[in-house]
Structure formats: C-alpha cells, structure tokens
Amino acid sequence: MRIVVALGGNALLHRGEHPDAAVQRANVDRVAIALAALAHENELVVTHGNGPQIGLLAGESVSDPALSAPCPLDLLGAQTQGMIGSLLACTLHDVLPGHRIVTLVTHTLVRADDPAFARPTKFVGQAYSRDMARSLARKRGWHIARDAKGWRRVVPSPAPERILETETIHELLNSGTLVVCGGGGGVPVTADRDTGALTGADALLDKDLAAARLAEDLKADFLLILTDVPNVYTGYGTPDQQPVLDATPADLRRGGYPDGSMGPKAEAAARFVERTGGLAAIGALDAAYAIVHGTSGTLVRPDLTVG
C-alpha cells in the first residue's frame, strides 16, 4: 500500500518545548519508531510541518544586523526542509537498516493571483504585546492579528496547486525508496505565464492540504495525518467532548473544526477521500501502525450511500 504521512509540527517540538537542536533530535527518535513498522509493509512518503522552526528562523532573520533585508519565507522554508529532513532521514536510516531513504526539497506551485495574497491569515513567529506588534507592523510592513498567544505576524497562505517534483517522487517510490519531502507544504513558487520561470513566494502553505494534493497526484491508497491527539473530537475541550471514530468528508465538514487546529487536517482528509476514493485517517503519532490497521484514530472513508 502507498501511504502519504503528514507529520504535525509537534512531532519534533512538543507544545511549550524550546526549539533546541537536542530537543528535536530526541523527539525525532519517537517519530522514526512510529513509522518504522509501517515502512516494513508499505511504500511511504513522509511530509512534515515546520511552524516552530520557520518561526524561529524568521525571527532571527529579522533581527540579524548583517542582513540588509530579512530572508523571504520561501527560502526560510527551504532551510527547514533541509534541517528537519536530515533529522528524519538519519534517524529512519538507523531504525530501517538496508532501506533506501532520501530527503527531497520540494517546491509547490501556487497561483500568483490567489486571493490569499491579499488576505494574510497564517501566523508565524513569536507573540507580542499589542503596542509592540503595531510598532513592528509599521516599521516592517507586517500584517498582524491576534491569536491565543497574543499579537502575531500573519502572512499569505495560498492554495497548493501542484508539487513540482511529483514525478521524481514517483520514480523514487518505484525504486523502493522512502521519501521525506514537502516540509511545511513545500517551497511556495509561482510560474510566469509566458516562460514558466519560477519565482519564490513570500508565503507559508498549509502542510496538510499540500500533503493531500501530493497523495492524490501520487495515486496513494492512504493519507495518514498524525498529530498530538488520538482522534478528531466534537466539542473538543468541553464537557461534551466526544471522539469521532468514523466519518465521511461531509461529516467532517459539518463538524465546523477551527482553522487554527483541526480544521485544515479535516479538510485535507476530506479532499483526498472525495477526489480519490481512498482512505484517510487522523490520529496520534505513536498509534500510526494501529491507525492504518483500523484500531485507532478517526477513519475518513467515502460516502457509500447510493442515491
């Protein structure tokens, strides 16, 4: 079976942890163990989040006196793909001796006229007080918005149209290689309508929606979205919280899950199942093998109702 795995950003950094290299190295061992059992039996493509890492790099770039201007987000995203991909590849190499493993920096095509460029919504970087955030917005031309942590920078998050290296990933899978790619949704690029020349976009992509797009184009059988909760829940965080064990795309969309947490995961699973007729699931990292075998997580399946 061909499985595309979407690792949450918390796979390498748990909530509240400092983004130290030693912390991420320790956490990646848990990721490798969770994926190893699946890799023995299936073709795997592993994608991953990069929120904490790119937030750190963006803050460092803004504050670096050696730079005349901060590095754009597309280049910072490429840096995180290399860093996180190296951690994953090395650790997977240790738990899967003899297995071919490669990390591939990938680029994701977005539309230059995507309305998201005019409506920044994706949070990046640290939280500030309102006054500090407003001062930075004036000084640096940022858009800012409030979230649970405080006032933060928001950037565009255009829809992923296509992962440009999809055919290369196909070939690697066909040769028996486990591929780590699509970190942070990939490096966002636009293409010139006349020449096809690529230009990096100062934006951040949704990694789950990009993983769903990649899984569709790779003709994957299963999209596995791993996070830090065992299931999708209705009424999450309330006394009425209930796990959702089985759902159709329509069920997920009726759930009204928040954009900042479960919403994109639910939408990614729904899109993949609708467009391919395959299966998707959302659940906890440590239960990856059990989720694929139907004993944990939230399974997302096609609506089998005959009209």
Image (spheres, rainbow, N blue to C red):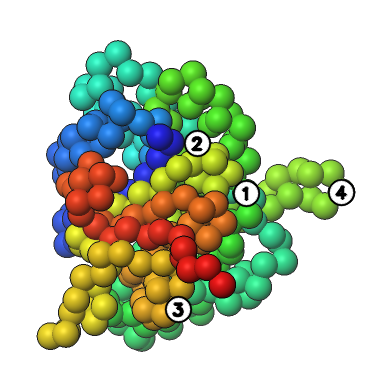
Q: Which residue bears the numbered disc 1?
A: 162
Along the polypeptide, which appears first: circle 4 or circle 2?
A: 2
| Front residue (pair 255, 165) | 255
Q: Nearer the viewer, mark 2 or mark 1?
A: 1
| Front residue (pair 296, 13) | 296
Disc number placed over residue 101 in the picture, else none: none
Residue at the image point whose x is 47% and y is 50% from the top: 278
Disc number placed over residue 105 in the picture, else none: 2
State if disc 1 and disc 2 touch (CB < 8 Å). Answer: no
Q: How far apart are marks 1 and 4 (CA)?
A: 18 Å
- With respect to residue 164, does 115 lie above or below? below
Q: In this view, does 237 lie to the left or right of 220?
A: left
Q: Looking at the rendering, in which quadrant would you find the N terminus?
A: top left
Q: Which residue bears the numbered disc 4?
A: 194
State if disc 2 and disc 4 touch (CB < 8 Å). Answer: no
Which residue ends up furthest to the front in the rendered image?
306
Q: 10 Å neighbourhood of mark 3: few (<14), some, or many (≥20)?
A: many
- With respect to residue 136, does 178 lie above or below? above
Q: Which residue bears the numbered disc 3?
A: 144
Q: Distance between the residues labelled 4 and 3?
A: 35 Å
Q: Nearer the viewer, mark 2 or mark 3?
A: 2
State if disc 3 and disc 2 touch (CB < 8 Å). Answer: no
Along the polypeptide, which appears first: circle 2 or circle 1?
A: 2
Along the polypeptide, which appears first: circle 2 or circle 3?
A: 2
Q: 10 Å neighbourhood of mark 2: few (<14), some, or many (≥20)?
A: some
- With respect to residue 214, does 88 lie above or below? above
Along the polypeptide, which appears first: circle 1 or circle 3?
A: 3
**Quick check: can you spot residue 294?**
yes
Residue 261, by quadrant, is bottom left
Could you tell me the amino acid type at mark 4? Asp
Q: How far apart are marks 1 and 3 (CA)?
A: 29 Å
